[in-house]
Image: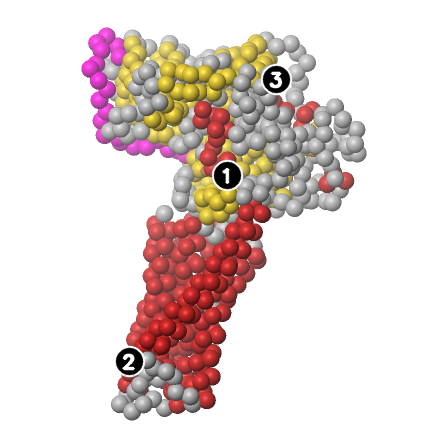
Amino acid sequence: MFETISSIMLTVAMTLLWGIAGITAAGLPYAKTSRSLNHRSTFLLWVAGTALVISTAWYGTITLQLIQDGWLFVEGTVKMLVPLTLLPQLYIGGAILPRLKSLRISGGEPPTSAALEAAAHPSILLSFLAAALASGISAFGTVFAQPVLPGLYQVGYRFLLVALLLLVPAMFANRRYMKVKKGIPLRRGLAVRLLKLVFASILTIIVAIAILVSNVLVGVQVSKLPEASDMMNHDWIDEGGGAPTRMSGSSNHHQHHAHPPSDSTDSADPSQVEVASLTGDISQPADRTFELVAQRKTVTLASGAVVDAWTYNGEIAPELRVKQGEMIEVKLVNQDIDRGVTIHWHGYNVPNAMDGVPGMTQNIVKPGESYIYKFRAEQEGTYWFHSHQQAAEQVVKGLFGTLIVEPKQETDVIDEEVILINHRWETDQGYQKAFGYHDQFQWKQVKPGKNVKLRIINAHNLSEKCLLQGTGFRIASIDGMRIQDPQPLSDGTTFRLAAGGRYDVVFTMPDRPVFLKLGDAKNESNPGVVFYGESVPEKPIFQAETTEFDPSNYGRPVVNDVTAASPFDREFHMILGNEMGFYNGRFHFLWTINGEVYPRVPTFVVKEGDRVKTTFVNKSLGEHPMHLHGHHMTVLKKNGKKVATPWLTDTLNVLPGESYEVAFIADNPGMWMDHCHNLDHAATGMTLHLMYDHVLPSYEVGTRSGNLPD
Ligand code: C2O
Ligand code: CU
């Protein structure tokens, strides 16, 4: 963050200084006397010198960031902005400044024709303007389009931009130079000069507008989403530097088209499988059956605020509770959600065909239709489910619930369990956060000495800080995965849940009240819980926060197949950035992955069994809870350093300026989404797909099918 801010300040300063230098240089050949030419040249030398010092400081900042944060943080800047600014500045330093020095001759007489000719040389004006434009592009880019992994096109485009914007000034400067060369005196009148300046500026603005308009036209066209796509676009794949996969060859499945699962005879290669057939073994009868009816429902929160919600079963967050090992069957019925619905089991590593992603693992369930999900509950823990059709709208409106899988054998003694699922509702009284129905504090009596387990789930688009005070506590699980030997955390420790993330928190009820709330202690409108023993406290009182919980140093390190020191088969990068641009033909503030938005973010292709590493680098100005379907990720490094206790997560919050290395084993074949769980970010393209190379699509995404899985 510090580097970003100083980069912005330094590049803005460079732009201003080079701009001033440009304007001064434009007036250079109008000097009436040697003395005034001397003064102007001296002024230019000072301005240019200062600009060079500042840009050196900027390059220093970039170097610092390289040392601190690593190459991935600076790669885009180094490849894209450094050459752009360095080139004109090197030229100025090497060729222009010595010439300006030679113009410093004192005297009241008119400058010699040789001096005037040197002063009028177009290279002076143009190199200053080029430096100003390059700095301006760098400043703009640092704020609105962090350069990431640039291709030749991105680098070339910026050079072209500078060249085009210099066209008009070049014409003017050249004409003037010709005049001076031929000895024709320049018209010195201020009005004439001003007029010329205005004229040149207008022409340049016309060029700029032409560039802008063509950019918009191209942007609108290029960003339009295809009516139908089936994830088999071979132009946009990333094999993570590993061995070539079947996707890289130009084999017959390039022509493969989406078709109903029954018709799988055109697949020439018997080792290939279709998504629809990846159901896992569901031959056994179900131990538990549920029905979830997606329906519009007006619900009333505890405070009386009313929400026009879209729900499962007319409830806020209905609970599915099963035992580990049970075969569960969930019938989804769509009563009246027009655009169709699905159920995605967030964080639960079901077989691919049960993952609930429209257009990838199933078709949407339209009004009047139903669909059956069946899988064995292999993992215990706290999970949730939600519709994955237009999730930025449907989840926000309430299409979600909780999935609690109790362990085969509970090793901890838990007397009291509370599920707290946080969501932000649009009510008739404005936006309000709530744990389930409780948009205010709820009060719970618990006998001192009893063991309490909180299953906290964050179903909101942004991360949430939690305060739990009045007792020490332990964090027993993160994202459904148990922490081994979690040590006690002191009273006052805060912890932060990623959007989509879950924490299980346990404590023993003391003989004084315990308070829990979301957000800062001062924030009165956030929901919370008061746990009390005998006497009811008047109101929750929160102390100052002490430390923030750090999962990278807690409990015992996870030991699994990816923490072993063997090499990875594939290594992917996800550079998270922001950009002004277009999505599906409309202007947006975009959140990008590797400089692109879906569907242009290359699909990560793996082979079954691969050991896969992914590096997240957040260069953008917002947090991104990165969520991979179908696999838990083991966090190995944070900000370039090995974490003390690798831990498992399915939704990792990556803050601006942070980087993480995570790894997983490709052991769940299929097509999986990998996206930001700020669903608004996902809806404008902060999404990519993880694809096993032997898996063929069964469905299609797009407006033709109505499958819109954001
Ligand atoms: Cu909870 Cu792809 O999402
Ligand atoms: Cu995001």
Residue 640 appearing in the image? no
Q: Residue 397 location, x and y as percent? A: 45, 24
**Marking on residue 684:** 1
Contact flag, marks 3 and 2 (Cβ < 8 Å): no
Which residue is painted at 55% across and 11% down in the image? 290
Contact flag, marks 2 and 1 (Cβ < 8 Å): no
Disc 1 marks a residue whose amino acid type is Thr
Which is nearer the N-term, disc 3 or disc 2?
2
Q: Which residue is mark 2?
A: 39
Give the Cα separation between the discs numbered 3 and 2: 82 Å
**Marking on residue 581:** none
Q: Residue 162 location, x and y as percent? A: 48, 64
Which residue is painted at 45% across and 67% down in the image? 203
Disc 3 marks a residue whose amino acid type is Glu
* 209 sits to left or right of 248: left
Q: Residue 607 location, x and y as percent? A: 66, 36
